[in-house]
Image (cartoon, rainbow, N blue to C red):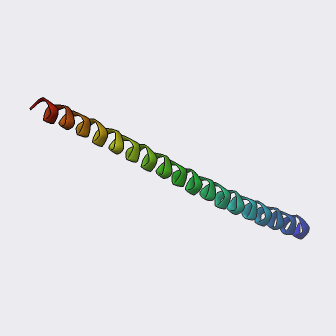
Amino acid sequence: MKEMETALKHDMKAMETKLQNDIALLRTEVQRDIAAAKTDLTRWMIGVGLLQTSIITGVLLKVAHLI
């Protein structure tokens, strides 16, 4: 009986260690995905800002040329 208890404790400890490693891996993957999303969002926002600035500049130059 004592051997079974020891084996069970060992198995539970091994499972706990594996789960902790899996959680750490998932946490790292999520952080990497969040960083990638932030980068994509920043690039998109800069692109939209430049496009908006170009459109406004073009409209103002067109209006200024008409006057």
Residue at left offset 39%, top offset 47%: 46
Q: Is residue 45 left or right of residue 34?
A: left
Residue nearer the viewer, 16 or 30: 30
Quadrant of the image containing the N terminus: bottom right
Residue at left offset 49%, top offset 46%: 40
Percent coordinates x, y for residue 55 in the rendering: 28, 35
Q: Can you say whether 47 is above or below 1 in the image?
A: above
Q: Is residue 23 left or right of residue 40?
A: right
Tell how many labels.
Answer: 0
**Among the 4 quarters of the image, the one containing residue 11:** bottom right
Percent coordinates x, y for residue 48 in the rendering: 36, 41
Q: Can you say whether 23 is above or below 61 in the image?
A: below
**Among the 4 quarters of the image, the one containing residue 28:** bottom right
**Among the 4 quarters of the image, the one containing residue 21:** bottom right
Residue at left offset 54%, top offset 50%: 36
Residue nearer the viewer, 13 or 36: 36
Quadrant of the image containing the C terminus: top left
Percent coordinates x, y for residue 30 in the rendering: 57, 53
Residue at left offset 12%, top offset 29%: 66
Q: Is residue 51 left or right of residue 27?
A: left
Residue sticking out furthest to the top: 66
Residue nearer the viewer, 9 or 16: 16
Percent coordinates x, y for residue 64 in the rendering: 14, 36
